Image (tube, rainbow, N blue to C red):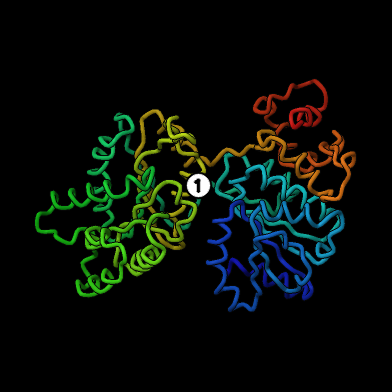
Amino acid sequence: MDFLSPHRKTLHENPDGWVLMISPRRNLVAELVAELRDPARSLGLRLELCENNEVFNPGTRKSVRIASAAVVLDSLAASGEQIASLKELKLVVLENLDILDADYELAVSVLRFKCHGLPVRFVGSSASLNDSGDLASWLQVDNSAFYNFRPFDRDRPFTIATKTFMTPLSSALYKAMAKPAHSALTAHSDQPAIIFVPSRNHCRSVAMDLITECALADLNNIRGFVPPHIDQNELDFRMAKLQDRTLFDLISKGIGFFHEKVGKGDRALILQMYIEGILRVLIVPRYSCWTLPVRAGVVIIMGTQYVFFGEDKSDRQVRDYELEEIVRMQGRAIRPGLDGHLHLFCHPDAKGVFTRFLNEGLPLESSLLGAGSLVTDWIQKSRGADASVKERVVKKQEIHKVLSWTFLRHRIASNPVYYDIKRGGNDALWQAVEKAL
């Protein structure tokens, strides 16, 4: 509820005003709406989820609108040059700025340009960054309102333990990881746990390996990871509601899955059992870290590589997890007022990189120049479908104007080598314009 206090204060001081919250991805928007719906209702705030080009439509009075960056970008293009509702916009909340992709950066940049000269307050939050000065400069945040907390600046202890494995990505690797994973779960036996694996195909095999480790550690343990205070009749009652009978042998041992192939009803039931403490362990594939709505006291990341298949399924590549994914997984072990524990299992070569950024903060660079024709496409789209062919031609000056409001402009001055910008040549931003074209 404290999270919504600035929204409430803003709307109390500006009865005709409204608040816009932007999140980089649609699934994060859904999570945000689910978390804020009840607190907003109790505070008397009108929460609106925007899924189409309706962000700046009339009827904004005393509302808190939430949208993804892509929806905001499309809404800005569809709304034309003059957007009447911006005059009443009082607060813009930018979520997860550490996931600043090209759509997000362009949406925020264009919105800031449109709001130039208007009394609109921008508030942003992100995971810890190793250099957030340019982010603050881009959003024109004063030093007195700029806070950069290090990853270990927490009100409660948070431990990170790493264990390395030389075994290549294979079933043998996860067999080798089962025992240390079981040890980590045993060390924090009073805590709920989430285990991240590369894909849903690994979920069942990892669960069975953990159950085997449970039996080897204690031959009298027939309930696996089911908390001792849970009555067997209660567990049986909940299990009887499952539609997928193949889940019985795992649920009965206190282990559940969360991925898209688990039926919607079973998925909701498993989450509810986990929240109530009936299930202690939740096994989740890598890509579901963005949609997982629950947290844990212990998070185990079993491996930091996955197999990527091309469109024809013949192109097989082993890829590393993105840093943003690792940080998102780590965030599932952070609960207000409670201790947290992260166990990272990885190859020795990856340990240094991941532990460095987990302890020092994430790097953040602009991805606009790698986004193809995003900027020119948006400029054309903003002119409307009725524009003539001649009117739809984008000039370099127009791209320069848009880029001058972006995070990219700040980063090419600080780190020109990363963007292949030559020092001492033409204006760096004009070089970026040429690359954008």
Q: Quadrant of the C terminus?
A: top right
Q: Quadrant of residue 303?
A: top left
* Image vertical order of residue 303 relative to residue 217, above or below: above
In-image side of 125 versus 121 (left or right): left
The residue depicted at 14 percent of the width and 60 percent of the height is 222
| Residue 426 x %, y % | 82, 23
The residue depicted at 42 percent of the width and 59 percent of the height is 295
Can you see residue 305?
A: no
Q: Quadrant of the N terminus?
A: bottom right
In-image side of 228 versus 342 (left or right): left
| Residue 402 x %, y % | 80, 42
Q: Quadrant of residue 51?
A: bottom right
| Residue 138 x %, y % | 73, 44
Q: Label 1 amino acid?
A: Pro
In-image side of 177 versus 304 (left or right): left
Classify mark 1: residues with Cα within 10 Å, few (<14), some (14-19) or many (20+).
Answer: some
* SS at badge 1: loop
The residue depicted at 37 percent of the width and 42 percent of the height is 344
| Residue 175 x %, y % | 24, 39
Can you see residue 420?
A: yes
Q: Which residue is mark 1?
A: 151
Marks counted in the figure total: 1
In-image side of 352 versus 41 (left or right): left
